[in-house]
Amino acid sequence: MKTAHPRTPDFSSFARTSDSFERLANRFDVIDALRSMAGIETRCDLGPLYEYSQEIERQVGRRANGIFVPHTALMRRDLNTMTPAAGGATVATELHGSKFIEMLRNRSRVLDAGATVMGGLVGNVAIPRQTGTATAYWVTEGNAPSESQQAFDQVPMTPKTVGAFTDITRKMLLQSAVPMQNIVMSDLVAVIGEAVDRAALRGTGGAQPVGLLDTTGVNVHAIAGPKPTWADMVAMGVKVGAATDNAGGAAYMVSPKVRGDLMQIEKVAGTGSMIFELDKLGGDGNIGGLKALVSDTMPTNLGTGTNEHAIFCGIWSDLVVGLWGAVDLMLDPYTHSASGGLRITAFQDCDVVCRRPQSFCQASYNPNA
């Protein structure tokens, strides 16, 4: 539901350099934006909020339904160093990142695995892809090789809209911005990140992207026994390496139950060396020296009995996450008007495509058997 801006002054004279634009994003505060849209008085300078939103509107060629919010504002953390649970044990001096990338990394395993992010997209996008190479010929003296040429196609990307909302009372919005900032962004980050993960792994197309599970050309490995063996996991890695001629950057992704299984299955009987080895440095783990990540969004309803869990191995940089514009933040004062509550909704236009399906291999089995 569209909410009118209280005041939207014209900032067209703003010098739109990348440096000044970044400074605008850094001055943006989500709670100030929400208070402004709710008609709640704030003493803060609202100029940077609308200036940033107007610049995004100019770039994408459309008006925001509410107000465009920089991804850096949603990923900001106002933690304290006094309480370990509030971040004292892990607080960092600085947080760097490319906007939405770091925001999603709090929740998204495909980005942790190394998926490529393309930001600032406008209109439909086509990624050129080479599908064939020239051919070399041995020739005798005085003869010329036959003509040959490369072949190309395109991987299309079109924006799909993912949305999330959280409900908040008007009284809470009037309170301190520090806890409210965390409440709002934590909810939006969690659900948007999970939605992108699910779409990347098992999206069905249509309103959402086509995920790896349904991407034509992805390698498939059949697990013959009731449980995967070390030979099965090696075979998946070999298929990816053979397809790309370079297994560097490859990683496995499994569900929590599959990890539990692989932590109990020896590579070779009697050696005590398990297929899934925990990372002593605090990460998820590794399988045969390749990174192994665990995700709750992995498909777990495959097979004839709809009880098989998927396993992926791949070169994750060949999975591309495209982002259009910024987060469109809207405030709905009507849904909970009887109680004085407010609904905060966020939308992001994005798409996920696999530019080289042969860089991935999938398998499945029932870890509960």
Image (spheres, helix red, strand yellow):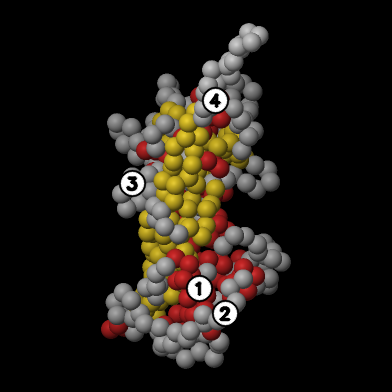
Task: Tell me the CA gap for discs 3 and 2.
Answer: 40 Å
Give the residue type that dot 2 points to: Phe
Give the residue type that dot 4 points to: Ala
Instruction: Choose between 32 and 166: the one closer to the eye.
Output: 32
Q: Are marks 1 and 2 in contact (CB under 8 Å)?
A: yes
To which residue does mark 1 refer? 55
Q: Is residue 341 visible?
A: no
Give the residue type that dot 1 points to: Glu
Write the residue at 44% across / 51% down: 125
Write the residue at 52% across / 69% down: 70
Residue 292 lies, in percent from the top left, at 57, 39
SS class, disc 3: loop
Task: Tell me which numbered mark, 3 or 4, is placed earlier along the sequence.
Answer: 4
Task: Tell me the CA gap for discs 1 and 2.
Answer: 9 Å
Q: Are marks 3 and 4 in contact (CB under 8 Å)?
A: no
Write the residue at 47% across / 35% down: 152
Residue 334 lies, in percent from the top left, at 29, 80
To which residue does mark 2 refer? 14
To which residue does mark 3 refer? 205
SS class, disc 1: helix
Please say if 98 is above or below 47.
Answer: above
